[in-house]
Image (cartoon, helix red, strand yellow):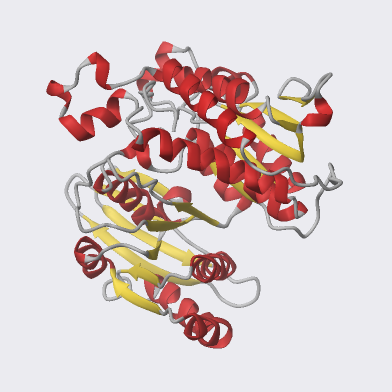
């Protein structure tokens, strides 16, 4: 596919003054977030960073034009270069299909990317002192680790049109088939669903969750409903426990942290009573729901890691892979500027509404998106000018192979049919 991606080397006459960052895969998005995305690059990234940028247009129209091949190619590029940074995209519903005259109702690009790359989606709240929390006791972040494979998101579901039996059959490569009766339908029928996961994917989920716990120095909780799904959810519980005992218990105890399995309903209640400061490993659907629930508990869906932080976390991972201290310091500085600017009273309308209540917000209480980005750019310039210069290492632009890969995603934080233009964070 020739028209799905382009590669740019950003630099220019003053390239020697910029930080060398190596290869990064960028995935462009939809509507207003796409506009904000370009402004973030223009004002906050490109003035300071020289990178080999591999860009993929994941806008809805281009996904349709390429039969969604562009999404697959973007994920494959992340495999090659180990770092992906993704803008928010729209998953079309029936209304969007009609509005944009799409060929079909394409699947979620995030889901496609997750299923290709596997791994775990981690979401962490951005905490600012002056943004009130709906759950006041949450004084530390709660990191949601969402298993990024299978379950409902790779399921086969269908409408049962009338009376009859639904069965599920496992046919081994050697041996006789085994059939399970799901339900004998009567009357007008109903609905049925078949879903799966794999031991390898669950093991990868466990390892990434335990490693996040060690990185943060926080305890890890896995939530399932193994009392009902004794085999399915029980498999998650058993694999996590096995890996913890064999590979992580000693490391966790050395740091004074722990791992524990809890029922999902009990975990929700415990999370509400906690002060935060833990990793919560969730199955795919649970993580989908709880990540937004936890985000709102911190005051705003916009305070989860999104557009600017997608760039900072992606560049920080590039810095980790390349042992690039200068790039790491830049990423940390940009994140600090975002928080410091908001805490100084310069914020977008949605955050001002968290403080005063939307009916009480005056125009003088907030900056629009463009004003806010300009303020961040101003503060970033000041912060970077006051920091000591670090030597920039030689960068391997075409890094691939066994290095850990990560994709950092901008989340819309709302239904797929809308995009919030007020919150570039």
> Which residue of the protein is positioned furthest toward the left in this rendering?
359
The residue located at (22%, 29%) in the rendering is 353
Establish if 306 lies above or below 239: above
- Side of 71 relative to 109 (left or right): right
Q: Can see residue 246?
A: yes
- Side of 364 relative to 337 (left or right): left
In which quadrant of the rendered image does the N terminus lie? Answer: top right
Residue 421, by quadrant, is: top left
- Side of 86 relative to 363 (left or right): right
230 or 388, which lies in front? Answer: 388
In which quadrant of the rendered image does the C terminus lie? Answer: top left
Q: How many marks?
A: 0
What x and y, as percent, mark residue 157? 38, 47
- Side of 81 relative to 113 (left or right): right
Residue 361, by quadrant, is: top left
122 or 317, which lies in front? Answer: 317
What x and y, as percent, mark residue 60? 53, 22
The residue located at (31%, 62%) in the rendering is 276
357 or 291, which lies in front? Answer: 357
What x and y, as percent, mark residue 270? 22, 68
Q: Can see residue 113?
A: no
Establish if 168 lies above or below 338: below
What x and y, as percent, mark residue 133? 23, 47
């Amino acid at each position: 596919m020739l028209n799905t991606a382009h590669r740019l080397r950003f630099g220019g006459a003053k390239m020697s003054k910029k930080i060398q960052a190596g290869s990064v895969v960028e995935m462009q998005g939809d509507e207003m977030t796409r506009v904000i995305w370009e402004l973030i690059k223009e004002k906050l990234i490109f003035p300071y960073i020289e990178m080999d940028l591999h860009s993929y247009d994941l806008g809805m129209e281009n996904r349709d034009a390429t039969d969604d091949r562009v999404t697959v190619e973007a994920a494959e590029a992340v495999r090659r270069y180990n770092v992906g940074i993704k803008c928010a995209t729209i998953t079309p519903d029936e209304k969007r299909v009609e509005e944009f005259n799409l060929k079909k109702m394409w699947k979620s690009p995030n889901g496609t990317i997750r299923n290709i790359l596997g791994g775990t989606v981690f979401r962490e709240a951005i905490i600012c002192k002056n943004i009130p929390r709906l759950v006041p006791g949450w004084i530390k972040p709660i990191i949601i680790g969402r298993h990024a494979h299978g379950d409902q998101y790779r399921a086969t579901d269908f409408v049962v049109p009338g009376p009859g039996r639904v069965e599920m059959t496992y046919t081994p490569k050697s041996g006789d088939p085994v059939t399970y009766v799901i339900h004998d339908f009567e009357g007008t029928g109903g609905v049925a669903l078949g879903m799966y996961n794999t031991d390898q994917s669950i093991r990868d989920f466990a390892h990434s969750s335990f490693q996040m716990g060690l990185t943060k120095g926080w305890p890890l909780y896995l939530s399932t409903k193994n009392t009902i799904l004794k085999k399915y959810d029980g498999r998650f519980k058993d694999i996590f426990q096995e890996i913890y005992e064999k590979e992580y218990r000693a490391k966790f105890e050395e740091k004074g942290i722990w791992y524990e399995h809890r029922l999902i309903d009990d975990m929700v209640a415990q999370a509400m009573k906690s002060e935060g400061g833990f990793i919560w490993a969730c199955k795919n659907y649970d993580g989908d729901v709880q990540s937004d629930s936890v985000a709102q508990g911190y005051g705003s869906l916009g305070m989860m890691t999104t557009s600017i932080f997608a760039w900072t976390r992606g560049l920080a991972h590039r810095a980790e892979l390349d042992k690039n201290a200068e790039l790491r310091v830049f990423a940390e500085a940009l994140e600090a500027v975002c928080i410091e600017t908001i805490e100084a009273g310069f914020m977008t309308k949605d955050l001002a509404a968290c403080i005063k209540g939307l009916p009480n917000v005056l125009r003088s209480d907030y900056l629009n998106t463009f004003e806010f980005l300009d303020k961040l750019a101003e503060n970033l310039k000041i912060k970077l000018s006051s920091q000591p210069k670090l030597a920039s290492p030689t960068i391997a632009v075409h890094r691939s192979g066994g290095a850990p890969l990560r994709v950092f995603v901008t989340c819309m934080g709302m239904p797929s049919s809308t995009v919030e233009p007020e919150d570039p964070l």
